[in-house]
Amino acid sequence: MQTSLSKRTIGCIGKCTSGLSVDELDQITDNINKTLNHPRGREIFKKFLEQYDLRDNLECLALFEICFEIIEREQKFPQSKKEPLLESLIENVKQVQEMAIDLDGVSQIDRALLERFNEALNSNSRNSLLSILEDTRNCCRDHLRSIHEKFKEYASEPCPMSR
């Protein structure tokens, strides 16, 4: 019985892509959104950034991941327990704000965004806090889009071990 090309898995190509199907590899290299929303995609993208010592991009990815995790966690909490969770969310937003302030090499994290952090923190509004996290996550994604083409090339190159 012949397996279809899309069901076959990729062997070692030297970049932690071993075990991915051809479809999965196509999916995670298709665009930055798909890369960042796929757990293995983010892992492989991170390895790429580490290999080329792209520090600003690594810090941007770390900030994206923290925003992503906080938003995911907050969306799972029941609305009835709002008060205790708001304190935790405020602390998380403060942590993200500190990271964003330290990200000098990311032009998308600008003064306007940083000022919105203060507004959201002063509002004590869950929606405002989540909104600034979403906007920060989107700014990080937009910044990482510029390096994604090189990532696609990297992911499609053969394993250096097989040459």
Image (tube, grey):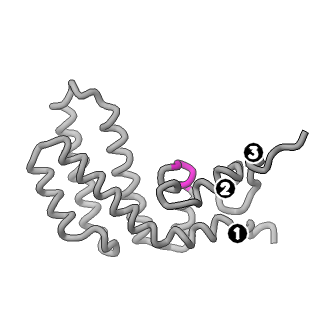
Contact between labelled residues 2 and 3, with CB atoms less than 8 Å apart: no
Task: Name the spot of residue 116 as percent of width and height, x first.
Answer: 16, 59
Give amino acid for label 3: Lys
| Label 3 packing within 10 angstroms: few (<14), some (14-19), many (20+) | few
Q: CA distance from mark 1 to mark 2?
A: 11 Å
Magenta span main SS? helix
On the image, numbered disc 3 is attached to which residue?
A: 7
Residue at image position (23%, 42%) is 89
On the image, numbered disc 1 is attached to which residue?
A: 157
Q: Earlier in the sequence, mark 1 or mark 3?
A: 3
Task: Name the spot of residue 163 as percent of width and height, x first.
Answer: 81, 72
The reply to whether residue 102 is in sight is: yes
Residue at image position (15%, 31%) is 83
Residue sitting nearer the eye, 107 or 86: 107
Q: Please identify the residue farthest to the right as the structure is shown.
A: 1
The image's mark for residue 17 is 2
The label nearer to you, 3 versus 2, is: 3
Q: Is residue 70 above or below residue 144?
A: above
- Give the side of residue 141 with respect to residue 51, left or right: left
Residue sitting nearer the eye, 56 or 134: 134
Task: Name the spot of residue 105 as percent of width and height, x first.
Answer: 34, 75
Q: Earlier in the sequence, mark 1 or mark 2?
A: 2
Magenta extent? 38-43
Give amino acid for label 1: Glu
Locate the N terminus by quadrant: top right
The reply to whether residue 42 is in sight is: no
Residue at image position (28%, 56%) is 135
